[in-house]
Amino acid sequence: MYVYDLGNNKTAKVRISKIEDTISIDPKVFSFNWNKEEKYEMYQLTLKKSNEVLGIVSFIRIFEELRTELRLLEISKHNIGKNKQYDRIAGILIAFVCKESFLSGFYGFVSLIPKTKLIEHYKSKYGFKEFGKHLVVELESSENLITKYLNDEV
Amino acid sequence: MMKYKKSEYSLPHHGLTTQQKSKADEELRKLRFESLSQINEHQKIYSDLLSLKYKMIDYVENGILSETFLFSEFLKNYVSILKITRRKLAKDLSVHETKLSRLINNKENPGIGLLYRIEEHSNNIIPVTLLWKVVNMKLIVDIENNNQERKKQSKKVKNKLKLKFA
């Protein structure tokens, strides 16, 4: 699993780990109120070489509907906008939630509710489709994200 | 107009009120149950095989041998997901039923040829390299713990190096 270092045109290995306590989240790097997410599952994406946290995601498994709802996803401040250093952070975290959905037996079904201005972005970049106010991926489109973002191959 | 290519965005809170969110969830629930009712047997098998594959990938990355993820357990799961008999799988893979039974009961390790056949049989969903890594994790422990073989082979070694380490 890797992110793309835009400054050096190189890849950098990353790992995903569970966040047990939000106290470890640096508010200078992440501005969302992650304390409110403590009752949900939270994971962070870090660089293997330095342990720098690049992104955080929270989600919930809804067993009665066989779906996973992606609640929040935040990319670190240094990696937003035109001067960002690493690319693929959001893609990897979304793909990770897709994988967890398959592991739960939910057919890779992941739903989320983006702000209106981001709807087209999630549809065109990640293959989400509209299910009412929610956007969803499942089965092949979910697997495609896993193949694209969680593989080691460049 | 936003530029979408090579752009990434965070997903902040949706901004809906509790009532709006409940309405959106209820709408999704109905659509979800509809989509679940349309999932066919092939899609269920496909999804279960992917789930099995991702569990095996996590196991290999974790690097700790577990009885739950032995190749023999993989075969049991594979037969169960496909809802076929062991006899049918043996026939599909061109192996003798007794041989498959020995593999499923962990009495024998598979050769690479069989792993290629499973890759083909699963339509490449379960790659041969992943299967080999799973088999290898057990082999490494088997080799490490095989003192009988170690002793037997050591008797055939002459002029053993006599080096001392601090």
Image: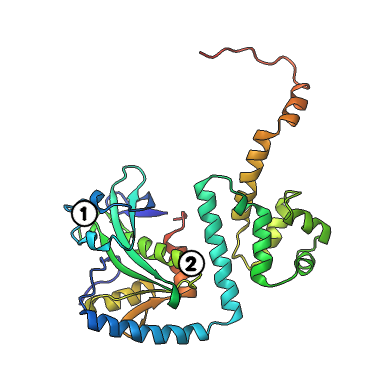
For the point 27% across and 75% down, the residue is A114
Name the residue that disc number 2 marks. Answer: A104
The answer to whether dots 1 and 2 both sit on one chain is yes
Q: The residue tagged with tag 1: helix, strand or loop?
A: helix
Is A20 located above or below residue A129 in the figure? above
Q: Position of residue A151 (x, y in %)?
A: 46, 57
Is B88 located above or below residue B147 in the figure? below
Looking at the picture, tell me which residue is in the foreground, A6 or A102: A102
Upstream in sequence: badge 1 or badge 2: 1
Quadrant of the snapshot with the C terminus of chain A:
bottom left
Image quadrant in which you'd find residue B78? bottom right
Looking at the picture, tell me which residue is in the foreground, B68 or A72: B68
Q: The residue tagged with tag 2: helix, strand or loop?
A: loop
Q: Position of residue B6 (x, y in %)?
A: 30, 65
Q: Residues within 10 Å of mark 1 (few under 14, many from 20)?
A: few
Q: Residues within 10 Å of mark 2 (few under 14, many from 20)?
A: some
User: Could you tell me how far apart the alpha carbons at marks 1 and 2 are, in whole angstroms?
Assistant: 33 Å
Name the residue that disc number 1 marks. Answer: A78
For the point 63% across and 39% down, the residue is B141
Left or right: residue B163 compared with residue A136 = right
Is A56 located above or below residue A102 in the figure? above
Instruction: Give the mark count.
Output: 2
User: In the image, what residue type sits under mark 2?
Assistant: Ser
Left or right: residue A37 compared with residue B164 = left
Q: Is residue B96 visible?
A: no
Do the residues under discs 1 and 2 have CB atoms within 8 angstroms? no
User: In the image, what residue type sits under mark 1?
Assistant: His
